[in-house]
Amino acid sequence: MPMIIVRPLDDELAEAHAFRHQHIEGYESQSQQIRSLRRQFGIEKGLGCKYPTTNLLAVVGDKPVEEYVRRHTMLPLMAAVPAYLSRPTASINDWLCSSFHLGLHRPIEDVRICVECIRFDDLQGTVSSYRRRHHIRGTSRCPWHGCRLHAVRDRLPLNARPNEWVSRQKVDLVTDIEADVPDTRWMHRYTSISMAMLSADKPVSSAEANKALLIALEGAGFSTSIRRPKPLVSDLLSAKAGTRWIAENLPVRGEAVNGTFATRFDGFGDNPWTARSSILHAAVWACFDQGDPWTKSMRANQSAGHGRVPEEPTRIAPSESIA
């Protein structure tokens, strides 16, 4: 029996694409789906580690593996700066190597939808889908429309299309964490940088990312070493993002942002090779108007005419009603 091609939708989460393929093919579970696909592709038992689920989904979606990982997994955001990478350069292979464990993961627990995106899909006559841009950690609003997102309230949230959950009234507004952020411009920048990370063609190594941020911080007069403890970028970040946002989204590990030097936030000069999370890079870069490597790369690709670039967040905040 020939394999059914199920192409992923625009910006569709790999996890949601897998679920759609599972239902179209009639598999009872994801494990049955994966076993069947591995048999079809002639993959011997014990070699599964060389054939992550993302590779299999790329085939059923009729997409090159590299493109599938870049455009349908959260790896470009979750591993914009790979924590395990010690060498000075990075490539798409660093995402491919981690896709076995993280390819279907998302950085937040909820499955989220945007009612305005659903309305847009309906106007365009396209199928509504679960989009990557609605699952950016530290945000609670759609990057394109500015309205608050909804979370699906069901044990199997991917078991129906977003518009079906809305019609069944099985969605709730997510907590508006952005309402407590003191600086709305910072929030806008953080979202924009995260979107740029999500559209990246390859990761940035810790050495590259830290060096770029070190230059920006020193150029702005901030401390980057415990030997010169003032002024602190952690104080600036606290003033712009707020303590609640930092506590809920950054890996602080007991390092309070309270006017004292915090190595993870402020020690870029003392620890230029230390891996820091992608979300921390986005949060610190959002304190500045420009200069982050992901936005630079995105704009360079746009100028060169390479692919579609995500739009800047509009923040028009339309109606959040699901009526």
Image: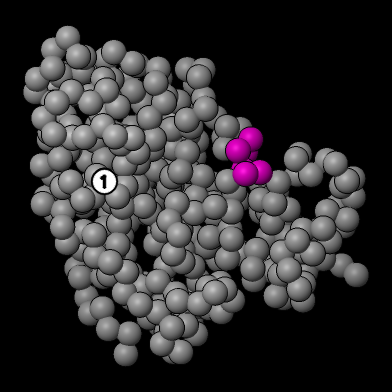
Relative vertical location of residue 168 with respect to residue 151 in this rendering, above or below? below
Looking at this view, name the residue that lies furthest to the top: 227
Q: Is residue 64 magenta?
A: no
Q: Amino acid at mark 1?
A: Ala
Give the residue at mark 1: 247
Q: Is residue 178 above or below residue 148?
A: above
Q: Is 318 or 27 nearer to us in this picture? A: 27
Q: Is residue 131 visible?
A: yes
Q: Decide if residue 284 is on the left or right side of residue 3.
A: left
Q: Residue at x 45, y 51 (%)?
A: 107
Main SS class of the magenta portion in the image: helix
Q: Report the number of discs.
A: 1
- The one nearer the camera, 51 or 254, is 254
Q: Position of residue 63 (x, y in %)?
A: 66, 54
Q: Residue furthest front?
A: 254
* In-image side of 182 versus 275 (left or right): left
The x and y percentages for residue 173 are 31, 74
Quadrant in the picture for the C terminus = bottom left
Question: What SS does tag 1 mark?
Answer: helix
Label 1 neighbour load within 10 Å: few <14, some 14-19, many 20+:
some
The residue stretch that appears in magenta: 96-101
Residue occupying image coordinates x 40% and y 79%: 171
Q: Tell me if 232 is positioned left or right of 64 in this view.
A: left
What colour-coding does the image apply?
one colour
Q: Position of residue 316 (x, y in %)?
A: 19, 68
Residue at (79% x, 64% y) in the render: 32
Residue 282 seen in render:
no
